[in-house]
Amino acid sequence: MSPPNDVAPMSALALAPAQAEAASTCLEELAASPARFFNRELSWLAFNRRVLAESMNPRHPLLERLRFLAISANNLDEFYMVRVAGLKAQVREGVRTVSEDGLTATEQLLLVNAAASDLMADQQTRWRELCAELATEGLHYVSAAAVTPAEREGLEERFLSELFPVLTPLAIDPAHPFPFIPNLAFSLVLKIRRISDGRQLYALAPLPAQVARFWDVTPGRQPTRRKSQRRVISLESMVTLFLDHLFPGCEIEEQGVFRLIRDSDVEIEEEAEDLVREFEARLKQRRLGSVVRVELEASTPEELRGFISASLHANPEDIIVMKGLLGLDELTQLIPPDRPDLKFKAFEP
């Protein structure tokens, strides 16, 4: 038998105060909980994702979208050099203080590495998309395998005259220990076999930071014009084309490329007697900072990955395998000075 018509409304009225009280209690608990805060590091990564989103904005000219991608990559490098390096220092020193949102340094590192990994994957996806768009405008980024014989001949002349004199290939053995690799530096890592006696060695070819990251491979290229064709290759790909000049009498068995990020946070004692000397000392220490992240090309064999990880004393979570181009922060070097049609209109006040 159904209840009278006035029973249901009375029941609802009776439940309303209880629900309101429960909601009020939940709000009070949330107000007193660390969960009410956004994590500082994750919030910054969310900000940098919005920077990356600008590289996808179709209202921006093509080269400006490329610039936004480079900015987001540069931001992420600095984030690891300072903020992530700080979290790793807290873990190393056993600091137990939690953040405002109630997370330990270890918990923050796990969340940061997961979010940053997704961000880096999206950056590489965006780079591949922009490559296709750049090709429609005559700017082609090519791999070492795509270099034609004529282009290779021209590149070899430039390699021998401009690059070869500043390269220092190194064989790694007990008499020649693993060298110091500076912050943000690129290096080729190789496993070579000496033809004379069949001895196998690990070797490095550090790439100098003072030379251009991208090299023109188009023979006899004229100054860039609208829709003119231009082909460029990265520095690391160019060096791999001519490893026989760096390691004569050796056979290259395996090779890969890696890039290093070190702790670059600087703390200055403001009460120091001589601030100039204090800055000089701190900047020297910054160069020797501990390893924060090691980026490896996905094509690098497992044996070479293990060699680099062990030589740099890097933790497994510090090793990042990149399916794409390392060092996207240097993509601004691809922007030609004479394509105003692909840039923001100049503002003249």
Image (cartoon, grey):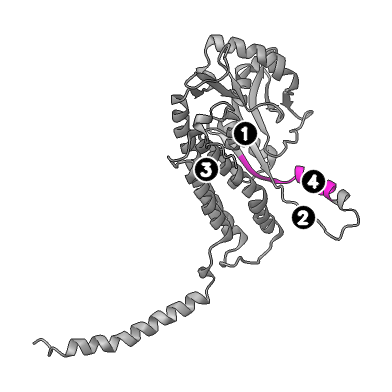
Residue that mark 3 sits on = 120
Mark 3, secondary structure of its residue:
helix
- Which residue type carries mark 3? Met
CA distance for labels 1 and 3: 15 Å
Q: Image quadrant of residue 208?
A: top right
Residue that mark 1 sits on = 258
Count of residue discs: 4
Residue at figure coordinates x 57%, y 23% from the top left: 233
> In which quadrant of the rendered image does the N terminus lie?
bottom left
CA distance for labels 1 and 4: 24 Å
> In which quadrant of the rendered image does the C terminus lie?
top right
CA distance for labels 2 and 3: 28 Å
Q: Earlier in the sequence, mark 1 or mark 3?
A: 3
Residue at figure coordinates x 64%, y 13% from the top left: 156
Crowding at mark 3 (Cα within 10 Å: few <14, some 14-19, many 20+): many
Residue that mark 2 sits on = 267
Q: Earlier in the sequence, mark 1 or mark 4?
A: 1
- Which residue type carries mark 4? Leu
Q: Earlier in the sequence, mark 1 or mark 2?
A: 1
Q: Is residue 288 visible?
A: no
CA distance for labels 2 and 4: 10 Å
Crowding at mark 1 (Cα within 10 Å: few <14, some 14-19, many 20+): many
| Residue 153 against residue 108 in the figure, above or below | above
Residue that mark 4 sits on = 283
Mark 1 or 4, which is nearer the eye? 4
Q: Position of residue 249 (x, y in %)?
A: 69, 12
Residue situated furthest right in the rendering: 273
Magenta segment range? 279-294
Near-viewer residue (264 or 55): 55
